Image: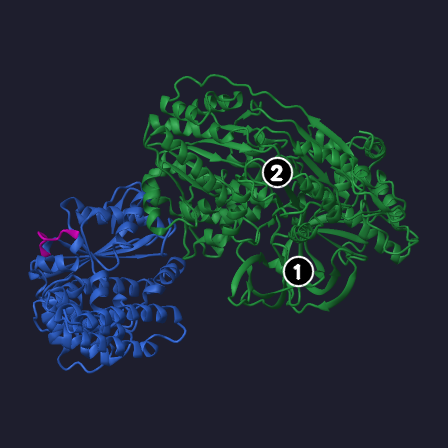
Chain colours: A green, B blue
Amino acid sequence: MALEQAITALRRGETVAEGFVAWRSFEAHEPRYVAWPAGIDERIVGALAKRGIARPYTHQAQAIEGALAGRNQVIVTPTSSGKTLSYSVPVLESILRDPSSRALYLFPTKALAQDQLHELHELVTEAEIDVKTYTYDGDTAPAARRSVRAAGHVVITNPDMLHTAILPNHTKWVRLFENLRYVVLDELHTYRGVFGSHVANVIRRLQRICRFYGSAPIFICCSATIANPDELACDLTGREADLVDDDGSPSGERVIAMFNPPVINRELGIRRDLVHSTLDIVARLQEADVQTLVFARTRNNVELLTQYLREQRWSQPGARPAVRGYRSGYLPKERRTIEAGLRDGEIRTVVATNALELGIDIGGLDAAVLAGYPGTLASMRQQMGRAGRRGDPSLAVFVASSAPLDQFVVKHPEYFFGESVEAGLINADNPIVAAEHLKCAVFELPLEPDEHEVLGPDTEPILEVLKEDHMVHRTPERTYWSSEAYPAQEISLRLGAEQNVVIVDQGPPAKVIGEVDRPAAMVLVHDEAIYVHDGRQYHVDQLDWEELKAYVRPVDVDYYTDANIAVDLKVIDEWDAGTRPSVYGHGEVSITYLATIFKKIKLHTHENIGWGKIRLPQDDLHTGAYWLALPEAATAGASTRDVEGALQGLGQLLVQVAPLLLMCDPRDLHLATQVKSPHTERPTVFLWESVPGGVGFGQHLFDATESLTEIARALVEGCACRDGCPGCVGPPPAPGLGTKSLVRSALAALTPLAAQATPSVSVGDRLTPAISTGDAATAGDAATAGAVAS
Amino acid sequence: MRGTAGGSSCYRELRYPLSDHVGDRSLDELPDVRSETLELLAPQEDLGDAAPQDMLFLDIETTGLGGAGAMAFLVGTGLIDNDQFVLRQYLALSPADEGALLDALLEDARLESEPVLVTYNGRRFDAPALDERATMHRRRAGFDSLRQLDLLHPVRSAYGGLLHSCRLAVVEAEVLGLTRHDEDVPGAEVPQWYFQYLRTGDGRHLLPIINHNAQDVVSLGALVARLDGSVRRVNLTSFDEVAVGRLLAHRRDARAVEFLTGALDGLPPSPVRRDVLTRLALAHKRAGDRDLAEPHWEELATAGGRGALQAHVELAIYYEHHVRDFTRAAGVVEQALANVHRTVAPWDRASAATWRSALDHRRSRLQRRMDAARAPS
């Protein structure tokens, strides 16, 4: 069959075979069924039977029983294992038992909410029961909102809508809050980091409103595989939950392969680049007509891959297979068309960002190819899980880039195949996040003194600040909102969501083709940039920074553009500092960044063929940062150029390793280096946060300094290159510089002796299961050596 | 001061003799407002049996436009007691006193006796807001379930387009002839003044709001009396004649013809005149009196402006289907076609095309009918 052919072609194929460092196949699993829990309404059971579900899987029955018994549930099973049923059955059952019962479903995106609405609607229609289900989001017509509020048994919405529209207007939702029986939190793992910390606060507010109306809903959470689903559920909801993770659903045979692009310059440790390596693999899948989803890390790579795949020489005569790009910035209608094309098999290859990672219904795919490490193991599993949803055989390939984390993963396949995954971390008590939500909470209901603890440890001092700013009015008994402002409107749960630059194709006829957020706009749609959308090139004629509009026109050129950003950093406030093993600390910094120049880079060869100036105003940001100075021992006697190189090398390492510890998106952190920092008076590496105000990554890194340096050290020691390569400290800036050895001695000085002997990693007790580098130094070589043989 | 558990609210009652002037009229007629007028003003509310003494005038001041964080700190009500207009105001001097305010209000308002609320935008704002505030204090109010005469809607039908805005302050000035005191606070600034008071405790920030609210409530009474008088043609000004005619036309009330015909007298060519002509012609047409509508359509067709094309079409229909004079109808269509480019904005090519194709269609049908009439049978 097609997939087997493709796998053979990959294992034997010229230019590709040598790159595969690991092949693993996983046997098909038979399903495990049990009887329906006692007392489920015949109409529900009957409707499910008609839809081909005679009995539930073991994990479904367990969750249904637990939820009906009034216990919170957290369900962690793979994509397509029927998680939906685990919460829909108890919800429908409780509504049939008491028609006044209500349920609230929260999904991270509107698209997922729509999917869910359809599914639930079909089930309700089939069962012929009177259960009203509605979505409530920005697209809900004002006229329809009243009936959703009054009559909706199941209201399907997203955390943002709950935050800005529902909670602040709870007095319009009396029916819902008085009778709220279940709250469903699907895609739980997406609620981590900054976004998760916000969502945890929104849920605190939700529970406060429920208490006011006398309800105490049960939480049913569903998550992709992460290390600490029950802990994350507990952090988000403030409640203990039963863990349901014994998957009873069937799965087809799965083959997972790891691909490390071949080294093309041994001296500099340079490997064939990610885009072309991915093309080599996808082309073979295309030839065998294997329906494939390619995940790329960046929007730029999505467009490059889409364009290159369309240009590929196609050995078979006849119609070329359809290739589509898919990422944020495409308009919703365009995305729906692509999703439908994937479902009905019309579209054979899609190149997507993680926008397609979540449970959007695109049916089963034969293969998934990951161009680069998506940042977390949980994401990697989710993306790979996109292949083989129907229980048919499937293939997933990870293609490593030369970035250190990618190299770490591809050289330590056990890291992925083993049990270890990251933990989802949130910090609901982050003072900046908590302060914003405290305003909303006071707006929603006057605050009683005994609630202070529930809303976070800093409630009292924050209230005093708000009082000074005349935002609240305090009496001895309570705190009241006393401002015209509508605080929820001023707080976005997600980064940069509110200030997007709209991209306008000037036509005629003029039309909007997409949008990008403000920081990305500086890089992607500055004047004269080549902006690529669905594989088509556009020249940016003008970026109107005031109006946030970029005017573009279609062109056909043989280059793309890449912008440089200059960053200046000042320490404003130091919150904690240490001196051993070297000067380090964290605190508040002020960042100014300025897009300076752009380079024109030739397609295919990626050579630099010109440059231009970018004229945009500088942007300022106050945020959190972590810093670490090079130890004296490591820099004694080194030249300034050596120190510069070492600083940059160490910085590259740390900024790549840190997301592993924080389970944040790599783009949440940025690097700045100072050869003689005015603050530490030493050569210093700074890691600063993208979010204004920061969310406490600085504090986490400060607490985890030892682990940070240990993992960095394991990476450098495990890399076979001589003077530095993109897989560790980066290629040396000039030949003859001892960058790698300087970084090695710096890390040796930074890493405690005990850790050097047994470099195992644990980051406080919360991150314990996250990563184990084990004997990285030797395993790296072993993996490389033994790889081809597997 | 009126206290309940957990707070206390301020309360004042003012009694105005109905003979007092509000703007250029007194409230003398208010106790005699006919239920017919109330029905005309709010046809959906089933006010056929409502008496003037059932009316509860209501206006509230809040600290914001929406959401649970905007409190009601001042509520004004009005009612008729024999020959007096009784104004009651309930004030919360602190957010902690809102519950007490609502208790006092609910005690006096006696919602169980089912008064008719008279408000300005109360359907959307005041009534649901009070109910929601009651929910915040675990009380049940029920203002929004009462029958309600929300004056904003009839005022829009009557005066919309004639005034630069239908805000109550503008209606007071332009319709009732009322000028507010200099120290009056604009509605939009009310929350800031109240917060200023909360911060400083200085009553000077509060007084203008209290007066503002009192004036709003009294104006509601004056407006009902005024509209009732105008419908009965008592002291009818030509401005009100236009307005009432428009309101009646909007309600498809036969009396519209009388008011609009009267209003047309001496009205110089203007957008207002064209508006009256359009509505009057439509009223005639609905009554089956197309012959009476004809001269108005004629005038509209020659007056130009946005309604001219539609007037041509109305004339063409009239000549074709009722007078059965195809040649004349065809003449009107030709005229209309010649006018499309002058009456449709140059950038609105889509609607120009729609007009042209509709007119072309009509022209060819008329041509066929003329040919058929000419052909020997």
Between residues A649 and A304, which one lies in front from this camera angle?
Answer: A304
Between residues A542 and B293, which one lies in front from this camera angle?
Answer: B293
Magenta stretch? B45-52
Q: Which element is circle 2 on? A: loop
**Which chain is indicated by disc 2?**
A
Of callouts 1 and 2, the N-terminal one: 2
**Mark 2 crowdedness (10 Å alpha carbons): few <14, some 14-19, many ≥20:** many
- Mark 1 vs 2: CB contact within 8 A: no
Q: Is residue A777 left or right of residue A517?
A: right
Query: Residue B50: within the magenta?
Result: yes
At which x and y percent is residue A689?
Answer: 66, 51
Residue in view at x 43 percent, y 39 percent: A117
**Numbered label attached to residue A637:** none
Q: Quadrant of the C terminus of chain B?
A: bottom left
**Numbered label attached to residue A425:** 2
Q: Quadrant of residue A368?
A: top right
Q: What's the CA distance linking mark 1 and mark 2?
A: 30 Å
Q: Quadrant of residue A359?
A: top right
**Residue A578 seen in the figure:** no
At which x and y percent is residue A786?
Answer: 84, 31
At which x and y percent is residue A750?
Answer: 82, 42
Q: Residue furthest front?
A: B376
Q: Amino acid at mark 2?
A: Leu
Residue in view at x 30 percent, y 76 percent: B337
**Residue position for label 1:** A523
Establish if B120 lies above or below A195: below
Q: Main secondary structure of the magenta part?
A: loop
**Residue B212 seen in the figure:** yes
Q: Is residue B150 left or right of residue A583?
A: left
Q: Amino acid at mark 1?
A: Val
**Which chain is indicated by disc 1?**
A
